[in-house]
Amino acid sequence: MNIKYLFNRTFDLAIVLIGISLIVFSMIRLIPGDAVAIMLGANTEITEEAMNELRARLGLDKSIIEQYFIWIKNMLMGDFGTSIWTGRPVINEIYINAWPTIELTSLSVLVGAGLSIPLGCFMAMSRGSVSEVLTRITAIAGLTIPSFWLGIVSIFIVAKLFPNFIALGYVPFTESPSENLKRMILPVIALSLPMISNLSRLIRSAMLDTLSQHYIRTARAKGVKSFYVIYKHALRNALIPFITSVGVSVGYLLGGSIVVEQVFAIPGLGRLVLGAISERNYPLLQSSILVMTAAFVLINFLVDLLYAIIDPRISRND
């Protein structure tokens, strides 16, 4: 990997993060309703004096441009603000709620990527067979099923078949590893199924293209065992587009986790963001969304670097 490639990707990362911060800051302020009145809550007497005081405390009495630069300056200094409702630092709120989301997303990536590789190889090797057609149809169907719908249906099915199985809620891994993993089974299935369907079809297409190459036919003509031809030669080259797609899929998983966390009552960043939207909790909302989107962008940045390591031609041509 050359320095120019690394510099270009780092520069792109900085530009994207600036763009995301502008979008997040602007979109939050386009949400209908008087944010200050909603922040004060139903139990507080909403007077003009109280509203002006809250506006001044949050800096909402300044111009939009001033608000943005103050927010960015504070963020760069590590000050994410204070939650309106709890009075706790926003960074603490994000830290507490980030772990369930990280665990849910990580397990979904492991399951989705781990199962899609052998499934894609199977479809490529058994091309045209009845089993391959059925598997491909199932994979296409998996792309059309929304994660939240699959989650709701799985809860009803499990409740009917296993009445004592607790499908809702979250137990930290440090408290009970077995209970934690048990509660994660259904959310991970609901979140990873579309990923498995998408990536397995990608592996199938890449494998079919790779298996038709001359060096694969040469290896087979030399008597190399089929297992080594598939998993050592063909799969290695087929994994290049697969790695890029895994990075992109993480973004969809983070977005899907917002709804899945609501369905399974998991106290993650998704529920935190939805609660902040309904409360118009500006400091918590804009920082939470920025952290989630920045995590997605950073993951794709690392995928770009990994892509250049796997295929050095990418960095040479940049």
Image (tube, grey):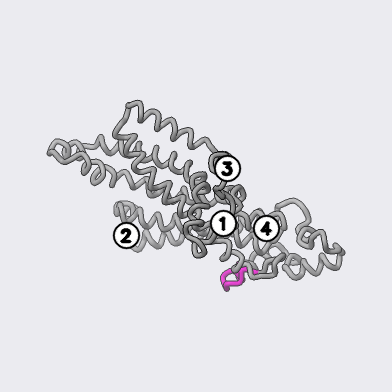
Packing grade of label 2 (10 A; few <14, some 14-19, many >=20) is some
For marks 1 and 4 on the same chain, the one whose residue lies earlier in the sequence: 1
* Residue designated by label 2: 1
CA gap, disc 2 to disc 3? 52 Å
Residue 147 seen = no
Please tell me whether residue 10 belongs to the stretch shown in magenta: no
- Would residue 32 be found to the left or right of residue 150 on screen? right
CA gap, disc 1 to disc 3? 17 Å
Q: At 63% across and 58% down in the image, what residue appears?
A: 272
For marks 4 and 2 on the same chain, the one whose residue lies earlier in the sequence: 2
Please state the horizontal and vertical placement of residue 151, each as a whole percent of the image.
56, 43
For marks 2 and 3 on the same chain, the one whose residue lies earlier in the sequence: 2
Q: Are marks 4 and 3 in contact (CB under 8 Å)?
A: no
Marker disc for residue 159 = 3
Question: Foreground mark, 4 or 3?
Answer: 3
Q: Are marks 2 and 3 in contact (CB under 8 Å)?
A: no
Q: Are marks 1 and 4 in contact (CB under 8 Å)?
A: no
Packing grade of label 1 (10 A; few <14, some 14-19, many >=20) is many
Please state the horizontal and vertical placement of residue 294, each as a whole percent of the image.
52, 59
Determine the image quadrant of residue 122.
Answer: top left
* Residue designated by label 1: 170
- Would residue 133 be found to the left or right of residue 213 on screen? right
* Residue designated by label 4: 276
Q: Amino acid at mark 3?
A: Ala
Q: What stretch of residues is rendered in magenta?
A: 72-81
The answer to whether residue 188 is above or below residue 123 is below
Q: Amino acid at mark 1?
A: Tyr
Please state the horizontal and vertical placement of residue 200, each as a whole percent of the image.
39, 40
Packing grade of label 4 (10 A; few <14, some 14-19, many >=20) is many
Which SS class for mark 1? loop
Q: Amino acid at mark 2?
A: Met
